[in-house]
Image: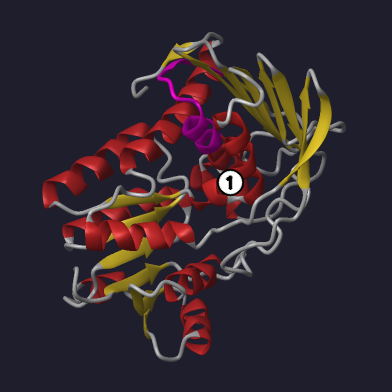
Amino acid sequence: MNDKKIRCAIIGYGTTYTWGWMHALWIKGVEDLNLVAICDQNPTCAEKAKEDFPAVDIYTTMHEMLNRDDIDMVSVVTHHNTHASIVVECLNAGKHVVVEKPMCIRIAEATEMIETAKKVNRTLAVFHNRRHDGNVRAIKEVIEQGKIGDVFHIELSACGYGRPGNWWRSQKEISGGVLYDWGSHAIDWVLSMVPSKMVQVTGFSHKLVWHDFSNEDQARAIILFENGVVADITQSNIAYVGKPLWRILGTKGAIVDTGRDAIKGYIKELIGPPGGSFKMVTAAGEMEVNYKESDWITYYVDMANHLRHGTPVPVSGEDGRRVITVLETAEKSAKSGHSENVPYQ
């Protein structure tokens, strides 16, 4: 692929949050990528895709689109419970695949996807582009520079009180559970920042209020790493009092971030402006650290460089499986009542 653009397709245009539309914009924003096809089995969504991108071929049947020889890479932007089967079919059709987060619901599905990619010699990448959020980039830089010493405790919290939306993301059999949405971002952030293997995961969940939805009302995953770091991730729809998005403790300081305006422009812009700041506390006092730009398009730039020049995969299938490992193991722990070892560290 060194001498031509990578020909791309999208499966799942949708109407909610216009995710397919945003993937199309990200792809079209990268010089080495060329969007040639979009598929959505819903005729209304397919019609909307044609209206938005008239120069792109539109399909309502995935198999018909995959039969094309002139498609190199497919981005899968569908419901969580459909990812595994669609990805395996795309790989077996000879396509490289980018799959939206979470890559699937179960560890066994992730392993099948990874093994299929190896078997057919194609790339499997997981779309954790939120690693490029402006606040995440700034927090990671402060940690890597050693400004708060050795990190030993990380908390991430997305908590509030309110009835969940009446859509598929509130249904456990489709979404995977309440922690699979924002929580998969949070887990990936932690795993990308802590340079250590996981030892065990402890999970808790509550189903107390919103009984017309099958998702848990609140779920929590606590990860213990081999180097002693503890990460605590909570998502809740029944919390009358919330917490900061980030709370990080180090041996020489701490970080507190509300996350306000952290993703300003998301699902609208290729690169989001630096929308705020977080507080860093050290022995010298308190100071505000500005967010960086949110360079979300970088994910697809990195993907293009991987396919054309052999640079690393932006987020590998194995990285994505670590996220699924935390999610599934937390659920197992919540049911067993004790901490569980992780099969993929």
| Residue 331 % position (x, y) | 52, 25
* Residue wearing tag 1: 171
- Magenta residues span 187-202
- For disc 1, the neighbor class at 10 Å (few under 14, some 14 to 19, many from 20) is some
Residue located 56% across and 68% down the image: 270
> With 300 as the anchor, is 276 left or right in this view?
right
| Residue 74 % position (x, y) | 32, 65
Image quadrant holding the C terminus, namely: top left
Residue located 43% across and 34% down the image: 324
| Residue 17 % position (x, y) | 62, 65
The reply to whether residue 218 is in sight is no
Residue 11 lies, with reference to residue 139, above or below; the image says: below
Residue 15 lies, with reference to residue 174, above or below; the image says: below
Three-letter amino acid code at the position of disc 1: Gln
Residue located 72% across and 20% down the image: 253
| Residue 232 % position (x, y) | 63, 23
Question: What colouring method underlies this structural image?
Answer: secondary structure
> With 36 as the anchor, is 210 left or right in this view?
right
> With 208 as the anchor, is 251 left or right in this view?
left
Magenta region includes residue 230: no
Q: In the picture, residue 118 is in which quadrant?
A: top left
Q: In the picture, residue 111 is in which quadrant?
A: top left
Q: Which residue occupies the foreground of this view, 307 or 292?
A: 292
Residue located 70% across and 48% down the image: 291
Residue 242 lies, with reference to residue 101, above or below; the image says: above
